[in-house]
Image: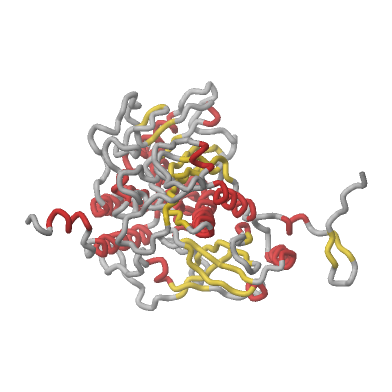
Amino acid sequence: MPPAKKEVRPSSRGGRARTPAFVKNQRGVKNWKEASAWLEWRGIEDIECITPDQAGVARGKMMPSKKFTSNTSLALPSAVFMTTISGGYPEDGNGFHYPEDDGDLKLMPDLSTLTVVPWEEDPTAAVICDLVHQDGRLVEFTPRNVLRRVLAAYDKRGLKPVVAPEIEFYLVRKNPDPDYPLTPPVGRSGRPIGGGAGYSIAGVNEFDELIDDIYHFSEGQGLEIDTLIHEEGAGQLEINLRHGDPIELADQVFMFKRTIREAALKHEIYATFMAKPIQGQPGSAMHIHQSIIDKKTGRNVFSAEDGSETDDFFHFLGGMQKHVPNALVMFAPYVNSYRRLTQSASAPVNNKWGYDNRTVAFRVPRSDPAARRVENRIPSSDANPYLALAASLACGLIGMTNKIKAEPPVLTTANAAEIDLPRSLLEAVDLFEADEELGTLLGKSFAATYAAIKRAEFETFMEVISPWEREYLLLNV
């Protein structure tokens, strides 16, 4: 059998040139010269220059690829990152001040994130951007930069966090009218999906074609799925990602959410990352596995040479126990998020930790010493992945810095006892604003902006009259 022919493309001089290896990369290039060749080789016509706002929604600009590579300056108004989920703006106060000039922030493409957009009919690519001021300084209050700020604090201590997110979501029937409850979709069997199908292969098979599209779209973007399972809820799935760098993993969650929504729409259903989309069904979480590596030795600082737990391990847990309740608004960012955090449910309402205990907030999975890690089980899937990772790692770092002692591990069921977390969005915002150490680490301007947005969102929610109020108050009070 003859050897396979090497792929070549015509050179600009009329000869034949070997195709550079980098143009075949599914994700990322090193510089603008490589970006031009990567785009040309794929025949890309349009570029989406996107960045996550405070809600994790993709914001940005689209342009022709030739303009993208012609040293064009890109900018977004600063107000984009002060907007509520409903499109409103918060009032000034408590350290937040809306900029009078609403000046532009520069979009700086991170070429390591350049990838195709596989669901678009026309050849399209996307690149995630950072935000900088006109003088080049990073914008403190944008989510990707908040996470980068926390990672820089680790770097100063010679440490590097490693994370692995797990994202749950629901597939639901198309429902354009928000007044009607969401319902499970119909699978390939032709019957509505029921609950109680945790880890069911048959449950996954109900959506074979949709899941195939998720895998194909992900592969086309260089996104790696570790595992996919059916969770307990009706039409609830979970995707686990491989462990790695926090910025890269937050980028992947950001892109996965877009990918899953687009794959679902192709099959005439919705994919939702609401924390509690269906009454009576389990909520959706974004569990975060975390370990910390010593950059000099490459060792996991949670494990000593003899394999035992280190002081850093217990101090990291101590920081989580003390500060995560104050950071809850970054893990549970909406009114709906608190419907998931209820007693005797699958989501923890405590700040306890334990070994392989799924009823506590901070679970330590069984593993060999090199893989020792802390799983934060509090974040819901509606959380902005950049901010959830930033907050979780910040709490652990404060614990290691201040040598906060962890409580003893819980060996029994912990989720039916007292509630250690805020029960509402406003209570969570109050605690967040009062934690000065956490606010300093995350950035004061971010903390003030984020708290103002959350207060404004709560006030918008309070304008809505719910079905419960009409059912029980209309004729009874």
Tell me: residue 404, above or below residue 190: above
Can residue 162 be seen?
A: no
> How far from the left and from the top, in percent, is residue 72?
61, 75
Horizontal side, residue 445 vs residue 220: left or right = left
Residue at position x 50%, y 63% from top?
51
User: Is residue 413 or residue 203 the one in the foreground?
Assistant: 203
User: Is residue 287 or residue 181 the one in the foreground?
Assistant: 181
> How far from the left and from the top, in percent, is residue 404?
35, 35
- The colour scheme is secondary structure
Q: Residue furthest bottom?
A: 101
Residue 205 picture quarter: top right
User: Is residue 112 or residue 378 the one in the foreground?
Assistant: 378
Tell me: residue 48, above or below residue 451: below
Horizontal side, residue 395 vs residue 6: left or right = left
Horizontal side, residue 258 vs residue 474: left or right = right
In the picture, the quarter occupied by the N terminus is: top right
Can residue 143 be seen?
A: yes
> How far from the left and from the top, in percent, is residue 259?
54, 56
Tell me: residue 36, above or below residue 385: below
Residue at position x 38%, y 32% from top?
358
Q: Residue furthest top?
A: 306
Residue at position x 48%, y 35% from top?
199
Label total for image: 0
Residue 446 picture quarter: bottom left
In the picture, the quarter occupied by the C terminus is: bottom left
Residue at position x 60%, y 58% from top?
113
Residue 175 picture quarter: bottom left
